[in-house]
Image (cartoon, rainbow, N blue to C red):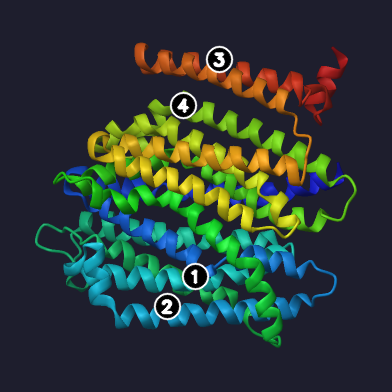
Amino acid sequence: MANLKSLAKDTVIYGLSSIIGRFINYLLVPIQTAKFAASGGEYGIVTNIYAYTALLLVILTYGMETTFFRFANKQDEDPRKVYGTTLTMIGFTALLFIAMILTFLDPVSAFMGYSSHKSYVAVMFICVAMDAFQCIPFAYLRYQKRPIKFAALKLLNIFMNIALNLLYLIILPALHINLFGMYDENFTLDVGYVFYINLFCTAALNLFLIKELVGFKYGFDKALMKRMLSYSWPILVLGIAGILNQTADKILFPYIYKNADAHSQLGIYGAASKIAMIMAMITQAFRYAYEPFVFGKSKDKDNKETYAKAMKYFIIFTLLAFLCVVGYIDILRYVIGKSYWEGLRVVPIVMAAEIMMGVYFNLSFWYKLIDKTIWGAYFSGVGCAMLIAINIIFVPQYGYMACAWAGFAGYGTAMLLSYFVGQKHYPINYPIKDIMLYVALALVLFVGMEAANKYLSVVAGVAVNTLLILVFFAYIAKKDFPLAQLPVVGKYFRKQ
């Protein structure tokens, strides 16, 4: 129980930084979708290029975050040497990547469809190289159990990004201040400034990571590097397949959706999907705390029981978040511009896919703990292949709705494969019956919410949905979190 409390505490800190940060980052969505109308396709360009950078970030870190935690927690390894070796490797490949992009910028931009906007590609790819390098000092902060600094720097980066977007996209045009002559006569700003702002914020973050980058001997170890690469390459394959599950639709869409409004439709899908990202926030927060926790606890006798409980609680709270988003979708839709509302129908599908991705992440530790990471590559590869196939077959006819269902199918496939194979190689007694009862209840409540959203007024629908959320919360309190055990409030219930 003490270990679960430690996990919960770190999850809260990482979670607050992730959830608050993502929530604040949501301000970019109304700012950018208000500034760039859906019909113009500019937000589709933002969605497309950020999808490329997400994929590149996985490639440029090549599984070394997880590998760093694995080797730093080995008794026969020096954590400082592991950190120095990892940092040197990632730094070298990041610089090499920047050099290659600048050398081959013309053909790369042409391939992506941005021949007339090569600066978009150059700026964001330099930015992602710096992001990859920064992943390692951030991982070191997690290893040292310094979530406060980790959270503060993540939030600082977001605050700077929001402030500069607000300044250049909203405030200066409203005041008719043409700073440096960057606006045209209508005070319209090129969408490329979104990327320039991102680069500035990422570069500034390096200044705050100086203590994690200097003051120690890097101690690059070639033999250690070989062992780490041997461990990490299946994680890289897994990571590529995993990130393609999230981004392949946004990368492929302009190529396979042949209508002239491809970027406009992609922008609608990308903007609507942002509302579903509450699930990604929870999953990311859990991941930040769970990864060092799992490897640190791998030697304990009760580790499997703890993993099973953690899985159950993860599913409970993600289902609760799912119901909250669906229940209040008529309010949350104002996060995005009105011209993007037609895409809101993808939100439940994308959120369900994110839940399965989170479950898959929880399941993935069985092969990491027994150093058989190749299994992760198999599972993610199969899931990714399904996602890409569904996109290619159905996107030309059904547009971005096919993208949403492809993600659902891809994550679901990887999740089921990992569970059934894992039970043979590293069996864990997950409380499947209890979990399925929660899933069934959530599905019933979801159907009720969808009916309320469709047939009732906004006020009446929100009222009904609030009651349905309270039903789910009451079930949680009865089954797994008795109110009598809570501090302060519990005193009242114990007297009843």
Q: Secondary structure at mark 1?
A: helix
State which tag comes first along the sequence, 3 or 1.
Answer: 1
Q: In the image shown, does 155 or 177 lie closer to the viewer?
A: 155
Does residue 41 lie above or below 345 as drawn?
below
Q: Position of residue 36 (x, y in %)?
A: 23, 49
The answer to which image quadrant residue 416 occupies is top right
* Residue that numbered label 4 is attached to: 326
* Residue that numbered label 3 is attached to: 467
Density class for disc 1 (Cα within 10 Å; few <14, some 14-19, many ≥20) is many
Q: Secondary structure at mark 4?
A: helix
Density class for disc 4 (Cα within 10 Å; few <14, some 14-19, many ≥20) is many
Distance in Å between CA atoms under marks 1 and 2: 8 Å
Q: Which mark is residue 60?
A: 1
For the residue marked with disc 1, what is the amino acid?
Leu
Q: Position of residue 447 (x, y in %)?
A: 47, 16
* Residue that numbered label 2 is attached to: 97
In the image, is 176 to the left or to the right of 146?
A: left
Q: Which mark is residue 310?
A: none
For the residue marked with disc 3, what is the amino acid?
Leu
Q: Position of residue 141 (x, y in %)?
A: 68, 67
In the image, is 416 to the left or to the right of 158?
A: right
